[in-house]
Amino acid sequence: MKPLSLLIGILIILAVTIKTIKAEKHNKRQKERNVTTQVSANKIKQYLSHILEQRTSNNVINKRENLLEKKKNQHKIRIKEIQNKDILKRNKNNLQKQAEKNFTDEGDQLFKMGIKILQQSKSQKQKEEAYLLFAKAADMGNLKAMEKMADALLFGNFGLQNITAAIQLYESLAKEGSCKAQNALGFLSSYGIGMEYDQAKALIYYTFGSAGGSMMSQMILGYRYLSGINVLQNCEVALSHYKKVADYIADTLEKSEGVPVEKVRLTERPENLSSNSEILDWDIYQYYKFLAERGDVQIQVSLGQLHLTGRKGLDQDYYKALYYFLKAAKAGSANAMAFIGKMYLEGNAATPQNNATAFKYFSVAASKGNAIGLHGLGLLYFYGKGVPVNYAEALKYFQKAAEKGWPNAQFQLGFMYYSGSGIRKDYKLAFKHFYLASQGGQPLAVYYLAEMYATGTGVVRSCTTAVEKRLTFLKKRRCIRWHFSYGIELPFKDIHLARRLYDMAAQMSPDAHIPVYFALMKLETMHLLQDILFFNFTMRWKWLKMDTTIGPHWDLFVIGLIVTGLIFLLRNHHG
């Protein structure tokens, strides 16, 4: 039994050993597994920790980026808002500027309409319409319209006289740079009308007016320095002022480059068109129209001239002018042909500018020995209109026309010698031709004579003679008138001012006493009749239009009645 028991014991020990070994292996594997699991867990923890840190960092970065983006967006929004505000502001300014421009344009249009109506006005009602437009334009800030209204307030046009308001408006305009307002204030200061009598202040106003371009201020300053009125007499300063006015007018004349209109001379007619009358009576005009239609060539040419320039009260009508010239040209009138050439040279609604047509008509007239046609050809060659510039040809035609006594051709000859245009300068010959042209009434010739005397060119320098020539030139251009005006038409509505001016005239010249006496009689008579006869429902006095009711010489008629009445009273008194 012992061996069996031993075997069983060995088997039991072996089984226990095997179990132990297995248990140890299991434990070992379990430990290894636990270690591996622990390492993995640690790695996971580290990884998770890293992820969390990265996420935290990313969140911070994202927050920062979001914050920056938000700030950028806010900045963009602000910029956009500013831009929008700027755009709105610009749009508002543009709209405001456009509105102001439209307002200004409307004011300009109203002023132009008023001027057109005033120029074409033939009745008081039309003039009132014109001034109503001026008033509307003035309300829109139109300076020229404001000047017109200031003049109306000063001179009492249409019962509007208010000298105080006129001065206020002139002062406002002067601040805006209106040279006309400066001139007006100078005039009012120099006579103490509505403001303090102050010659020094008047001189300042005239100086500013002349600096601003007022030709009238230049004229007044020229006269003051020439005569020594409230300034030291100085011919040179006077010459300087007159020269500026003369230069302006001469420049305007020279730019025309046309053929000046020939004076109308119909001396064999009883009611001739060359009379000094400014207005041609309607019935006489109808009579001349009748003669023109009957084939009177001279009348046809004369009516053509009058319509061409709008003289003697006739409207400027190029179509009518062309109509009469063509009728006369058809009958063989060289003058008519020359005037048609002039019309095509200058160009107008009836005859569009055409140098070739002008050349044709001038040539036909010149072939008949017509001075105007010869002069016209000279102009074409001198200025190169439709033909190449050819001073030799121009000189030839000017000489032929000058020999026939045409003043404009004499002037052109003088100018060629004066300027050396195509020929050698010769101031003596220039002076000779300018002088001949001046005797024929050519204004530019007088201007250049004054220049020669002022600069001592070709003649002995003489300031006095130069001033005299300047004045002659300005008189020919109707810049000097013997009625009191500074660029606007009268009559005055201020009786007291008129009395004062008449008194001043009498004090300045002893020879003026008698004319002034009769003028004052006329003034008092007008004042009396105005007060008695013309009182209207608006409580305004209206100006008496005696010229239209009694005649142009009604004043002599009234004075005659007064003298007759005085003689009658004296006889009764002595009787």
Image (cartoon, grey):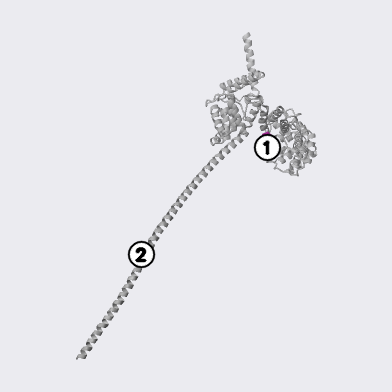
Q: Does residue 64 appear left or right of residue 475 in this picture?
A: left
Task: Determine the secondary structure under disc 2.
Answer: helix
x, y percent for residue 20: 26, 80
Q: Which mark is residue 1?
A: none
In this view, the mark in front (2 or 1): 2
Task: Name the residue carrying label 2.
Answer: 49
Give percent across and percent down for residue 492: 60, 25
Residue 500 shows up from this direction: yes
For badge 1, the amino acid type reads Asp
Residue 514: x and y in percent read 65, 18
Observer-nearest of 250 and 525: 250
Q: Which mark is residue 317?
A: 1
Q: How far is mark 2 from mark 1, CA to CA?
A: 107 Å
Prevailing secondary structure class for the magenta stretch in the rendered image: helix
Q: Which residues are magenta?
A: 247-251
Q: Mark 1: which secondary structure?
A: loop
Which part of the image, by quadrant, shows the C terminus?
Answer: top right
Q: Quadrant of residue 302?
A: top right
